[in-house]
Amino acid sequence: MTKNELYGMLKDIIDENSIFVDESMKKHISFKVGGPADVLVRPKTEDEIKDIFSFLNDNNIPFLVKGNGSNILIKDGGFRGVVIEIADNFSSFEIVGDDMIIQTGALLSSIGRAAMENNLTGFEFASGIPGTLGGALAMNAGAYGGEMKNIVKSVRLMDEKGKIVEFTNEEMEFGYRHSILSDRKMIAISAVISLKNGKFDKIKEKMEDLAYQRRTKQPLEYPSAGSTFKRPDGYFAGKLIQDSNLKGASMGGAMVSEKHSGFVINYNNATATDIINLIEHIKSTVYDQQGVRLEEEVKILGED
């Protein structure tokens, strides 16, 4: 099926203003690299997501579901197929008592602000993570001692046929940077997170303190995908990289951050290939010098 044929069929499902052909992924991922997606769609309703999801699965069309693009890297050749972007186009929420019912395109920062404004505590740890709820659920995002598994009550999921199912916290199989979404052909549509009543000033103070820690310890001034590598058992990836004399190492426009060695950054108009080559160089050097195999946390997708 050609891109134009795909565009024509998708127009029967969602508004044509929400369909983008040959869309540069540089505009849609936090690394600011990557070639074009054949087609990118931004559905606005659950029914649109269902119809798109069913159509793509029924026709065996490759697809990628993404949120804010803060944990993926699209290669320079782009993505052959359809990218479904679930971000600010699908991000409403409501508060019922101490629970928040949230669509998965909502930014974690927006959820954090809303929780604070409603005197709800428990979400502070995630409020500075640059992603959407969907991405956070998929990888059980965590920071500063908190994880999504600690606050998620239930998640509404859509399977490849468009059927909606609701999973409890336990059924989500949350683990370190893992959930059931890592293994199944399903997407998260919404979730209920359970918080606690707190005091506005204390919540604000904690959020500001965590934001300060991020600014001073992480290279937020450069495009990146956050921590590039998972934490190896018994080690810290950043220290292993630093101890291998890789702080400041670069390839093309990609560099190991001098502020935090666990971050690979796009410091000078890097290509996706620059970043991937540097990641591979880090992995091989750390293994040769430290005997530890690093595994990237960022998902590398697309074509060379």
Image (cartoon, helix red, strand yellow):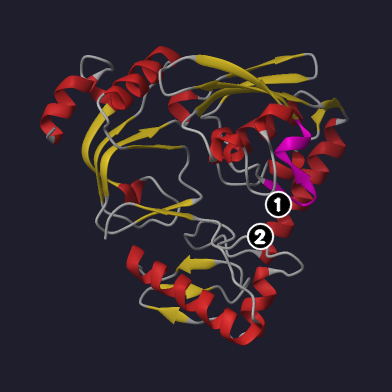
**Tag 1–tag 2 contact (CB < 8 Å):** yes
Residue 15 on image: x %, y %: 26, 18
Q: What residue lies at 47% left-to-right and 14% top-to-bottom?
A: 163
Q: What residue lies at 42% left-to-right and 24% top-to-bottom?
A: 160
Residue 293 on image: x %, y %: 60, 72
Image quadrant of residue 114? top right
Q: Spatial distance from mark 1 to mark 2, Cα to Cα?
A: 6 Å
Give the residue type at disc 2: Arg
Confirm whether the magenta stretch covers residue 145: yes
Q: How many numbered circles does the render carry? A: 2
SS class, disc 1: helix
**With 173 as the anchor, is 132 left or right in this view?**
left
SS class, disc 2: helix
Image quadrant of residue 93? top right
| Depicted 260 relative to depicted 247: above or below | above
| Depicted 248 relative to depicted 210: above or below | below
Neighbor class of circle 2 (other Cα within 10 Å; few <14, some 14-19, many 20+) is few
Confirm whether the magenta stretch covers residue 250: no
Neighbor class of circle 1 (other Cα within 10 Å; few <14, some 14-19, many 20+) is some
Q: Is residue 84 visible?
A: yes
The residue range painted magenta reads 142-151
Q: Which mark identifies residue 304?
A: none
Residue 267 on image: x %, y %: 44, 70
Give the residue type at disc 1: Ala
Q: Which mark identifies residue 211?
A: 1
Q: Is residue 246 visible?
A: no
Q: Which part of the image, by quadrant, shows the N terminus?
A: top left
- Which residue carries the number 2 mark? 215
Which one is in front, 204 or 71?
71
**With 98 as the anchor, is 302 left or right in this view?**
left
Residue 95 on image: x %, y %: 70, 16
